[in-house]
Image: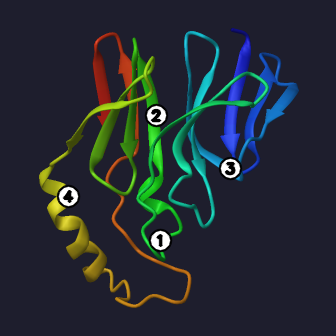
């Protein structure tokens, strides 16, 4: 649509195709991943420090950054500062897919109802060696205050037609 969208710790920056900053969409502290819909709204997986149980995993935003709806539940693992809640997003038809960076899991949401309609665990032989690799690299069992080491399982997700592709 002649725009370039980039997310970082400021939010979503919208640039013209010539590279000029047009606006900043900043609904939360930061945005880990986002995807646009055919309705010109944006689904975003937000980064929230010290998230509460009722903070959403995903929000739907209008073009100004106003929250329209909330999707999903956070894990809120104590001491992990939201790592298990970082999810890559993609849309295919009427479905929203969330693939988790630090959990080998994909959740599937119906866009119309906002409800999770399924999820699946991703199993790959390399995942079984990740914990051992951290140990081999001598990652401390009790890292310094405020630091935690967990395996990274997924690096992205994209949809094309009726297929979903996951990057390990």
- Seen in the picture, residue 86 relative to 60 is either above or below; the reply is below
Label pair 1/2, CB-CB below 8 angstroms: no
| Dot 3 alpha-carbon crowd within 10 angstroms: few under 14, some 14 to 19, many 20 or more | many
Q: Quadrant of the N terminus?
A: top right
Residue topped by disc 4: 127
Residue 80's disc number: 1
Residue 30's disc number: 3
| Dot 4 alpha-carbon crowd within 10 angstroms: few under 14, some 14 to 19, many 20 or more | some
Q: CA distance from mark 3 to mark 2?
A: 15 Å
Which residue is painted at 53% across and 68% down in the image? Answer: 81
Residue depth check, mark 1 versus mark 4: number of the one nearer the observer: 1
| Dot 2 alpha-carbon crowd within 10 angstroms: few under 14, some 14 to 19, many 20 or more | many
Q: Nearer the viewer, residue 158 or 69?
A: 69
Q: Position of residue 64 (x, y in %)?
A: 79, 26
> In terms of image quadrants, where is residue 17?
top right
| 116 left or right, relative to 76 | left
> In terms of image quadrants, where is residue 107?
top left
Residue 89's disc number: 2
Label pair 3/2, CB-CB below 8 angstroms: no
Label pair 1/4, CB-CB below 8 angstroms: no
> In terms of image quadrants, where is residue 35?
top right
Which residue is painted at 45% across and 74% down in the image? Answer: 78
């Amino acid at each position: 649509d002649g725009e370039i969208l980039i997310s970082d710790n400021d939010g979503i920056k919208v640039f013209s195709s010539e590279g000029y900053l047009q606006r900043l969409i900043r609904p939360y502290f930061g945005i880990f991943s986002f995807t646009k819909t055919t309705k010109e709204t944006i689904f975003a997986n937000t980064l929230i420090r010290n998230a509460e149980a009722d903070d959403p995993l995903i929000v739907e935003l209008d073009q100004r950054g106003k929250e329209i709806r909330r999707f999903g539940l956070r894990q809120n693992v104590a001491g992990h500062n939201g790592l298990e809640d970082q999810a890559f997003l993609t849309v295919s038809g009427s479905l929203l897919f969330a693939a988790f960076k630090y959990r080998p899991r994909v959740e599937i949401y119906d866009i119309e109802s906002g409800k999770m309609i399924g999820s699946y665990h991703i199993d790959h032989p390399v995942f079984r060696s990740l914990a051992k690799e951290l140990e081999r690299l001598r990652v401390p069992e009790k890292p310094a205050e405020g630091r935690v080491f967990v395996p990274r399982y997924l690096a992205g997700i994209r949809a094309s037609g009726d297929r979903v592709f996951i990057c390990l």
